[in-house]
Image: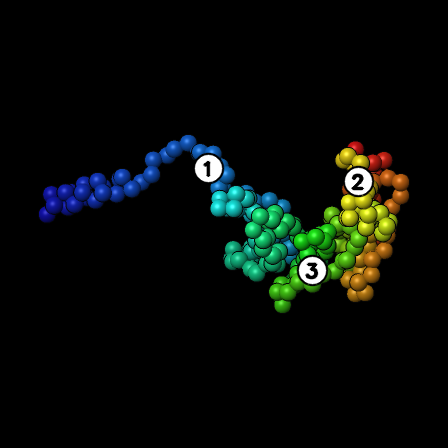
Amino acid sequence: MVRLSVIITLVMAAIIAPAIAEPRPMSPVDFLETPRLSEPALSPDGRYLAYLRSETVWRENKIIEHLDLIEVATGAALPSPDFGDADPGEEPARVSKVWWHPDSRRFVYLKRAAASDKPQAFLFDLNDQESRQLTAHGESVLDVIWRPDGSGFYFITAEQQPTGDTQLLSSGWIIPPFESNADREVWSFDLDTGETAPVISGRFSVRQVSLSRDGQRLIFSRVPDHKL
């Protein structure tokens, strides 16, 4: 009986051994197919984690990003905003990082309302799992800083161009200088009224902004030109 057991064990080992993959060096394909995680954002109460995850789509010759949202305690996936699907031949929709509201039940993310629009701030609510557009600024929203009381936020954006120049640029009648772009400035957004107002602007470009814990003071760094 012992001898039979030994024979069975050897036969099973011979069957299983070839199925075990031998270690091998990582190939360029493996490298491209490895998901990359970036822009982690933990909710203020520590219950939720949002992050970006890349995916290689060979049939479309693209690397696209997804916004994943999980519950920290269980690792369970939660519904996240829909950024829309790109049409064939178009660039995939740019997926944004998130900025958590102080109540940890909502967050702001950036999205184009239409393919030709500039990214604006949207609010996603975990309770009803719905999004709504907040800003309709003339330029792209680039960064968001929530007020500590959650009543609104500050956002960094490019300096708004005159309406006439914007129309001429979009129609191709004005060709902007090489590597030119508008300087950065800071605006505020009120969550209750939906009103926006300029806060920091001038003949300079804002680079970084920090808000005090009580929400009463803003400190920022600036440069003469945004390209510096």
Tell me the SS state at disc 2. Answer: loop
| Residue bearing the label numbered 1 | 29
Q: Is the residue 32 above or below the residue 50 in the image?
A: above
Indicate the position of residue 69 as horizontal and vertical percent values: 58, 55
Q: Is the residue 75 above or below the residue 16 in the image?
A: below
- Camera-side residue of 202 and 210: 202
Residue 175 badge: 2
| Residue 48 visible, this angle | no
Nearer the observer: mark 1 or 2; the answer is: 2
Amino acid type, mark 2: Ile
Q: Please indicate whether residue 163 sits to the left or right of residue 66 in the image.
A: right
Residues at marks 1 and 2, CA–CA distance in whole angstroms: 41 Å
| Residue bearing the label numbered 3 | 123
Residue, x 60% and y 57% (percent of image)? Answer: 84
Residue, x 59% and y 53% (percent of image)? Answer: 86
Decide: few, some or many residues near mark 1? Use Cα within 10 Å; few <14, some 14-19, many ≥20: few
Decide: few, some or many residues near mark 2? Use Cα within 10 Å; few <14, some 14-19, many ≥20: few
Residues at marks 3 and 1, CA–CA distance in whole angstroms: 37 Å
Residue, x 80% and y 63% (percent of image)? Answer: 194
Amino acid type, mark 3: Leu
